[in-house]
C-alpha cells in the first residue's frame, strides 16, 4: 500500500494484456473481490458494506477473468473503495471498468473519485460515471453482454491523491462488475482518437468522454488449418450486428458457405467479418468468382463490396458525452492493415433484378494478407420465383435536408435513396417570401431547386406525399412569434403564403405537399398555442393537407381533428398515444433516427425490424427517418458538435458520392420485407376470393404464419421498445422472411392450379 501511495506512476497504455486478476480481499459474502489494477500492480479493495455477491468469470480478449455478480434485492449491493493513488496536477488518468447488466433498475453503477491534497485533506468529490434506469426506462438485455468503459480525467491543480470508490445498488435485475483499473495515460482514448479527428485536435476534451468496448462472452473459436495459413478467421455477421473492433464470432457465425435466399427485386447482402490472428498487412478482399449458375447463367445486376469504417459514436443519447467505437458507414473496399485480435467487417451487395431466373448461383470470395496464402470462401445465392412489388403501399421516408446545388449530385442522392427502398422524403423551408407588407411571392431560387428535386422524385418512382416543414415561414413573413399577438391581417397573410405554395406545387405536378407548420407543439406552451392557431386555419383551406408531429396523447386528441396526418416519435408510442391516433382517425407515421441514439440495437437489424415487421404490426401508414445527411461539422466525426450526426448516408468522393450507413442498409432490407408482407396479404385475399379448398387452405396457413410473426411484437409502449433495443434476436427478421417466402410460394402454387 505504501508503494502505491508514494511511487510515481508510470505511463501505461490500456488495455494491459499482461496484467492478470488475482484475489483481492475477502468480502462479507465469503468470496473474494477482484483487485483494483494500478500502474504498480493490483491492490486490494476495501469491500466494507458489500453483500449479496458472488464471483463469476468472463472472457476478455481470449482471457478468462473473475467478476462480481449481483442479483438485485433490498439488501444486495457492491461497495468498493480503493487506496489513495499518488498523482500530479496535469496528469491524464484513466479509470477503466467492465460492466454487464440485464433488465436492471435503479442506480446500477456509480464511480466516484475523491480528490485530496498533499496533506491528505479532501478537496472535492467528482462523479466520474453513473448508470441509472427508472421504472419506465429500458435497460439493455442479455444481447448487450459485457462492455468495458474508460473514464478519463485531467488531474486538477493542487490535487496530489485520488481515491476511487464504486457502488452498485440496483433495485431490480442483475449486474456483473468486472476488471477495474486506475492508470496514468490516455489508454483506450488513444485508440479511440484514431477514429476521431475531434479528439486529435482537441486533446483537452478527452476527460469528458467515456469510451466503450464490447467484450463478447464465451470461448473464442479455434481457427481451422486454412485460417491459420491465411492468418485470419472468417465468420458471418448478418446485418453487421455487433460490428465492433474486438468482436468475437458467436454461435452460428462460423459457416462453411454463407448463403442468402431472396426473392426477385431484392438485394442479397453477404455481411461478414475477418479477425486477424497476427499483425497482418495489405489485407485484400475481392469477389474472385462471380455468381454463376451451373448452366452459366448469371442473376444480373452488379455486386458491390463495401468495407465497414469504425468511428467514435455517442452512446446513451444523441447529445451524450459518452462514446464508443462502432461501425458507422460502409465505404469502398481497399487493402488495409489489420492488427492481431482486431476485426474488419465487410458487406457484399448482390442485386437480384425482377427478371432474374430462379435457381442456385455460386461465387467465391478471396481474402489474402501479404505474405500469407489466400483464404477462399464459397458463397451461395438462391433466387426464388417470387417477385416483390415495385413500390410499397407504406411510406418509407427520409428527411432530405441540406440538398446539394449540383443537379448531378442531387440525382445521385435521389437514385441512391430509391435503390435503398426509400419512397418518400420530408423537406424543410418555405419557398415564398414577402412581396410587400400585405403580399407574398414565390422565392424563385428556392422554388426552382425544389422543382428540380420533385422532377427527380417522380423520375425515380416517389409517389407518396411530401412533408414540408416550414416553421420558418413565421419569421420570413415577419409575423409575431406568439400566437396571441397575431392580427386578422397576419392570419390572412399566412394563409395566402400557404395557398401560393400549394398552387405552385400542384401546377408542376409535385408529390402532394403535407404542410408541417409547428415542430412538436406539446414541448412548449408557445408552440402549442401556435398550433392551436395555425392548424385550424389550414384545416379550413380546401385542398391543404395539414401534418404535425405530436407525441402527447392529450395533444393528439385536441389537435388531431385539424390534421390529415400525425407523426409520432418512435420512442413515444405508448398505448395511450396509439389509441389517441386511432380515435382521431388520421394517417399516422413514426419518426425515428436513421442512425440510432444509443449503443444497443441501433444497427441494420433494428431498422429492418421496425420498417419490415413492426409497421404492418401496428397498422401505421409509414415512417420518416432522420435524416439523409445532417451532420454537425465534419460528417465523419460525431464528436465535433453538441449532438450526434444524423446521417443515413455519408458524403463520398466520385464516382460513389454516397457511402451508405449500416442503418440505411437495414431500412432497405426492411422495405423489402414490408413489400413481401404486402404481397402475402394480396395473395391471401386472392386465394380467399378464389373459393377452392386448396386456395382457402393456403390462405389460412399463410395468414396464421403472418399473424404469429407479427404477434411477437407488443403493439406499443415500453415493452416493444425493450424488445427492439434490448431483447431482439438480430437474426429473427431473416427467419421471418424465409417463413413468409415459403407461404408465398404455396399461395402462388394454389392460385396457379
Image (cartoon, grey):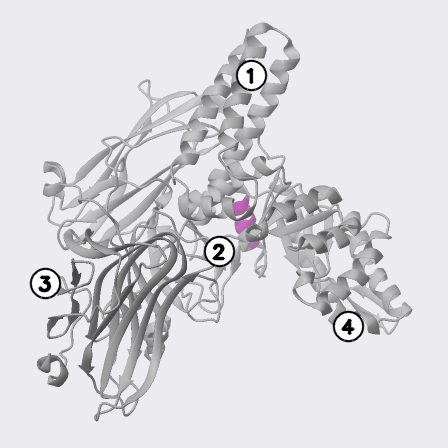
Q: Which residues are magenta?
A: 410-417
Q: Residue at x 23, y 36 (%)?
A: 254
Q: Residue at x 11, y 64 (%)?
A: 19
- Nearer mark to the viewer, of 1 and 2: 2
* Residue bearing the label numbered 4: 482
Q: Is residue 448 left or right of residue 77?
A: right
Q: Earlier in the sequence, mark 4 or mark 1?
A: 4
* Residue bearing the label numbered 2: 135
> Badge 3: few (under 14), some or many (20 or more) residues near its Cα, within 10 Å?
few
Q: CA distance from mark 1 to mark 3?
A: 62 Å
Residue 251's disc is none
Q: Position of residue 722 (x, y in %)?
A: 46, 47
* Residue bearing the label numbered 1: 700
Q: Position of residue 148 (x, y in %)?
A: 27, 60
Q: Residue at x 59, y 55 (%)?
A: 400
Q: CA distance from mark 1 to mark 2?
A: 41 Å
- Nearer mark to the viewer, of 4 and 2: 2
Residue at far right of view: 488
Q: CA distance from mark 4 to mark 1?
A: 57 Å
* Residue bearing the label numbered 3: 18
Dot 3 and dot 2 residues touching (CB under 8 Å): no
Q: CA distance from mark 3 to mark 2?
A: 41 Å
In the depicted structure, whether residue 465 falls above or below residue 190: above
Residue 385 seen from this side: yes
Dominant secondary-structure state across the stretch colored magenta: helix
Amino acid at each position: 500500500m505504501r508503494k502505491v501511495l508514494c511511487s510515481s506512476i508510470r505511463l501505461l497504455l490500456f488495455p494491459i494484456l499482461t496484467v492478470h486478476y488475482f484475489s483481492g480481499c475477502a468480502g462479507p459474502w465469503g468470496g473474494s473481490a477482484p483487485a483494483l489494477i494500478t500502474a504498480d500492480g493490483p491492490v486490494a479493495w476495501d469491500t466494507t458494506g458489500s453483500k449479496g455477491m458472488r464471483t463469476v468469470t468472463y472472457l476478455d480478449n481470449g482471457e478468462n477473468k473473475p467478476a462480481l455478480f449481483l442479483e438485485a434485492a433490498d439488501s444486495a449491493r457492491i461497495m468498493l473503495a480503493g487506496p489513495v493513488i499518488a498523482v500530479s496536477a496535469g496528469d491524464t488518468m484513466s479509470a477503466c471498468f467492465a460492466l454487464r447488466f440485464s433488465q436492471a433498475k435503479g442506480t446500477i453503477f456509480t464511480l466516484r473519485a475523491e480528490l485530496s491534497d498533499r496533506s491528505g485533506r479532501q478537496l472535492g468529490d467528482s462523479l466520474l460515471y453513473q448508470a441509472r434506469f427508472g421504472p419506465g426506462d429500458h435497460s439493455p438485455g442479455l444481447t448487450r453482454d459485457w462492455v468495458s468503459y474508460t473514464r478519463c480525467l485531467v488531474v486538477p491543480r493542487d490535487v496530489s491523491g485520488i481515491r476511487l470508490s464504486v457502488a452498485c445498488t440496483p433495485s431490480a435485475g442483475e449486474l456483473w462488475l468486472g476488471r477495474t483499473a486506475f492508470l496514468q495515460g490516455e489508454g483506450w482514448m488513444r485508440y479511440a482518437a484514431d477514429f476521431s479527428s475531434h479528439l486529435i485536435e482537441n486533446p483537452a476534451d478527452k476527460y469528458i468522454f467515456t469510451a466503450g468496448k464490447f467484450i463478447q462472452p464465451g470461448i473464442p473459436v479455434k481457427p481451422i488449418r486454412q485460417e491459420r495459413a491465411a492468418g485470419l478467421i472468417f465468420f458471418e455477421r448478418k446485418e453487421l450486428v455487433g460490428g465492433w473492433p474486438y468482436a468475437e464470432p458467436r454461435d452460428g457465425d462460423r459457416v462453411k458457405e454463407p448463403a442468402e435466399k431472396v426473392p426477385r427485386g431484392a438485394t442479397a447482402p453477404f455481411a461478414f467479418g475477418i479477425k486477424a490472428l497476427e499483425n497482418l498487412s495489405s489485407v485484400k478482399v475481392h469477389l474472385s468468382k462471380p455468381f454463376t449458375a451451373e448452366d452459366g447463367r448469371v442473376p444480373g445486376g452488379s455486386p458491390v463490396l463495401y468495407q465497414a469504417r469504425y468511428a467514435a459514436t455517442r452512446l446513451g443519447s444523441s447529445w451524450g458525452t459518452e462514446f464508443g467505437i462502432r461501425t458507422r458507414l460502409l465505404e469502398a473496399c481497399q487493402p488495409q492493415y489489420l492488427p492481431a485480435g482486431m476485426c474488419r467487417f465487410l458487406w457484399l451487395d448482390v442485386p437480384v433484378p425482377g427478371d432474374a431466373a430462379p435457381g442456385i448461383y455460386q461465387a467465391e470470395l478471396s481474402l489474402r494478407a501479404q505474405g500469407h496464402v489466400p483464404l477462399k470462401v464459397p458463397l451461395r445465392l438462391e433466387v426464388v420465383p417470387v417477385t416483390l412489388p415495385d413500390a410499397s403501399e407504406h411510406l418509407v421516408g427520409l428527411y432530405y435536408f441540406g440538398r446539394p446545388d449540383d443537379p448531378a449530385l442531387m440525382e445521385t442522392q435521389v437514385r441512391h435513396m430509391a435503390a435503398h427502398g426509400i419512397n418518400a422524403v420530408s423537406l424543410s423551408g418555405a419557398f415564398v417570401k414577402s412581396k410587400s407588407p400585405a403580399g407574398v411571392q414565390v422565392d424563385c431560387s428556392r422554388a426552382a431547386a425544389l422543382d428540380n428535386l420533385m422532377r427527380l422524385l417522380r423520375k425515380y418512382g416517389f409517389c407518396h406525399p411530401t412533408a414540408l416543414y416550414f416553421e420558418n415561414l413565421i419569421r420570413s413573413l415577419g409575423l409575431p412569434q406568439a400566437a396571441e399577438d397575431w392580427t386578422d391581417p397576419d392570419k390572412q397573410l399566412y394563409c395566402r403564403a400557404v395557398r401560393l405554395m400549394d398552387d405552385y406545387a400542384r401546377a408542376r405536378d409535385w408529390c402532394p405537399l403535407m404542410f408541417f407548420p409547428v415542430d412538436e407543439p406539446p414541448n412548449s406552451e408557445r408552440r402549442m398555442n401556435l398550433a392551436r392557431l395555425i392548424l385550424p386555419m389550414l384545416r379550413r383551406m380546401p385542398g391543404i393537407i395539414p401534418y404535425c408531429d405530436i407525441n402527447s396523447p392529450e395533444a393528439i386528441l385536441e389537435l388531431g381533428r385539424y390534421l390529415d396526418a400525425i407523426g409520432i416519435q418512435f420512442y413515444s408510442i405508448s398505448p395511450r398515444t396509439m389509441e389517441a391516433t386511432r380515435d382521431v382517425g388520421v394517417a399516422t407515421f413514426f419518426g425515428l433516427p436513421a442512425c440510432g441514439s444509443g449503443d444497443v440495437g441501433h444497427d441494420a437489424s433494428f431498422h429492418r425490424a421496425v420498417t419490415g415487421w413492426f409497421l404492418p404490426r401496428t397498422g401505421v401508414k409509414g415512417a420518416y427517418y432522420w435524416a439523409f445527411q445532417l451532420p454537425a461539422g465534419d460528417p465523419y466525426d460525431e464528436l465535433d458538435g453538441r449532438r450526434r450526426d444524423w446521417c443515413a448516408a455519408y458524403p463520398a468522393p466520385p464516382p460513389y458520392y454516397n457511402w451508405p450507413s449500416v442503418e440505411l442498409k437495414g431500412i432497405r432490407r426492411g422495405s423489402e420485407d414490408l413489400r413481401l408482407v404486402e404481397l402475402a396479404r394480396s395473395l391471401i385475399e386472392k386465394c380467399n376470393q378464389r373459393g377452392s379448398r386448396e386456395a382457402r387452405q393456403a390462405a389460412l396457413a399463410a395468414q396464421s404464419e403472418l399473424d404469429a410473426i407479427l404477434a411477437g411484437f407488443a403493439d406499443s409502449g415500453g415493452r416493444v421498445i425493450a424488445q427492439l433495443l434490448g431483447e431482439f434476436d438480430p437474426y429473427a427478421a431473416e427467419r421471418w422472411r424465409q417463413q413468409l417466402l415459403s407461404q408465398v410460394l404455396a399461395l402462388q402454387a394454389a392460385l396457379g392450379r
